[in-house]
């Protein structure tokens, strides 16, 4: 988004606008609150592709009957530290926070908590759920599968989704270590942006209808996995891992089986996207004191590593996002014109 095209909105005002927009479509108050919480996490930390701009998208799916406004979610404990949540095709954010909470409850007692989710929808930024663990002294992981937008390594057509992984770890005296990344070369909306701007894509990002690497955004049909045409076997394997955890273990649909919104069948066939959440209690491993000493030493080593450019010091994962959150807290969160109109800003 260019500086000229956005309006900057204070966090509290923007959150209320998003919440009201969701309620206007029939979302239950709790679901609207949890969806707003997840979207604001992304927008606050600079992940605008998964932030408040998605609110109109979810509202559109609600009004089209593709997201249930009154889902009957069923959380089933399957062991001392495991559970499965049937999200009943409601807003995925409320289901995801519920699943992460259960994983954390298990981890406090058993050291590990793992919860799989099925019959869900797009859950936004994975980091919104992984970060829940860190303030509670736990390590958290969140992942999901998604509709096919990414080729296999050497594949001609889309097979995996962008299948993100997020991981958060508490660090004494500073913001948590936080990773949130897709397993594709770039998000697909990057291709859409380049297509709209009429500029070429970087090499190694996208694939055309013949399965060949293309820099022409107009010809791009899907993305390369992380690593591109030479090393994409790494990204493809990571995307497969997300599918194993989110779909194979939970009973959700595999990525190529998920009916995209653009398919007319999506009105009758629920998406059945899967998620997977993991919480780890360091007290049950190295011990709390041992963990805090070790993570502090590790983070310090990262921060003091010798950079190539002294003006650009080495960073701990999450540092850029935490800094952006501070800037946006002071200056407001940027909202693009289309989203601003939809939210009545």
Image (cartoon, grey):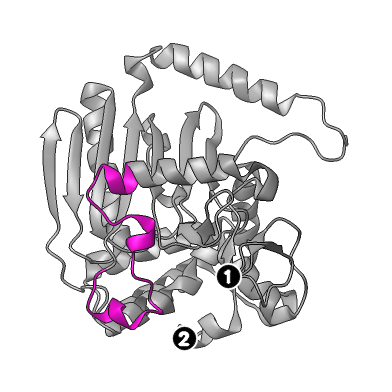
* Start-end of magenta stretch: 245-270
Q: Position of residue 325 (x, y in %)?
A: 59, 54
Residue at mark 2: 342
Q: CA distance from mark 1 to mark 2?
A: 29 Å
Foreground pick, 54 / 162: 162
Q: Residue visible at 24% across and 81% down?
A: 65
- Above or below, 320 against 55 in this view is above
Residue at mark 1: 221
Q: Label 1 neighbourhood size at 10 Å, few (<14), some (14-19), many (20+)?
A: many
Q: Label 2 neighbourhood size at 10 Å, few (<14), some (14-19), many (20+)?
A: some
Task: Classify residue 263 as left or right of residue 213.
Answer: left
> Considering only order in the chain, which callout, 2 or 1, is on the residue closer to the N terminus?
1
Q: Nearer the viewer, mark 1 or mark 2?
A: 1
Residue 332 is at least partly visible in this image: no
Residue 54 is at least partly visible in this image: yes
- Above or below, 265 against 83 in this view is below
Task: Classify residue 46 as left or right of residue 130.
Answer: right
Q: Position of residue 265 (x, y in %)?
A: 29, 79
Q: Secondary structure at mark 1?
A: loop
Foreground pick, 53 / 144: 144
Q: Position of residue 289 (x, y in %)?
A: 43, 13
Q: Position of residue 10 (x, y in %)?
A: 54, 69
């Amino acid at each position: 988004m260019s500086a000229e095209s956005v309006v900057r909105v204070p966090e509290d005002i923007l959150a209320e606008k998003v919440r009201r927009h969701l309620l206007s479509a029939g979302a239950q108050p709790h679901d609207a609150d949890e969806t707003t919480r997840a979207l604001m996490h992304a927008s606050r930390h600079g992940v605008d592709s998964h932030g408040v701009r998605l609110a109109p998208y979810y509202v559109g799916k609600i009004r089209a009957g593709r997201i249930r406004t009154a889902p009957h979610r069923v959380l089933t404990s399957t062991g001392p530290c495991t559970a499965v949540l049937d999200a009943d095709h409601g807003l995925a954010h409320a289901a995801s926070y519920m699943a992460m909470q259960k994983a954390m409850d298990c981890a406090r007692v058993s050291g590990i908590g793992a919860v799989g989710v099925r019959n869900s929808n797009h859950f936004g930024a994975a980091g919104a759920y992984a970060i829940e663990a860190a303030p509670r002294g736990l390590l958290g992981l969140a992942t999901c599968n998604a509709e096919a937008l990414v080729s296999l390594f050497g594949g001609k057509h889309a097979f995996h989704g962008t299948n993100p992984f997020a991981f958060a770890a508490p660090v004494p005296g500073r913001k948590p270590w936080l990773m949130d990344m897709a397993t594709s070369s770039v998000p697909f909306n990057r291709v859409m942006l380049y297509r709209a701007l009429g500029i070429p894509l970087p090499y190694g990002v996208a694939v055309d209808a013949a399965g060949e690497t293309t820099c022409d955004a107009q010809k791009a049909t899907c993305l390369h996995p992380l690593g591109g045409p030479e090393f994409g076997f790494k990204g493809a394997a990571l995307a497969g891992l997300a599918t194993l955890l989110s779909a194979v273990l939970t009973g959700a649909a595999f990525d190529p089986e998920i009916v995209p919104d653009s398919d007319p069948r999506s009105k009758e066939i629920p998406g059945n996207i899967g998620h997977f959440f993991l919480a780890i209690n360091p007290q049950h491993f190295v011990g709390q004191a041992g963990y805090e000493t070790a993570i502090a030493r590790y983070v310090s080593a990262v921060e003091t590593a010798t950079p190539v450019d002294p003006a650009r010091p080495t960073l701990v994962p999450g540092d850029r996002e935490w800094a952006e959150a501070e800037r946006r807290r002071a200056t407001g969160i940027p909202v693009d014109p289309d989203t601003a109109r939809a939210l009545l800003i």
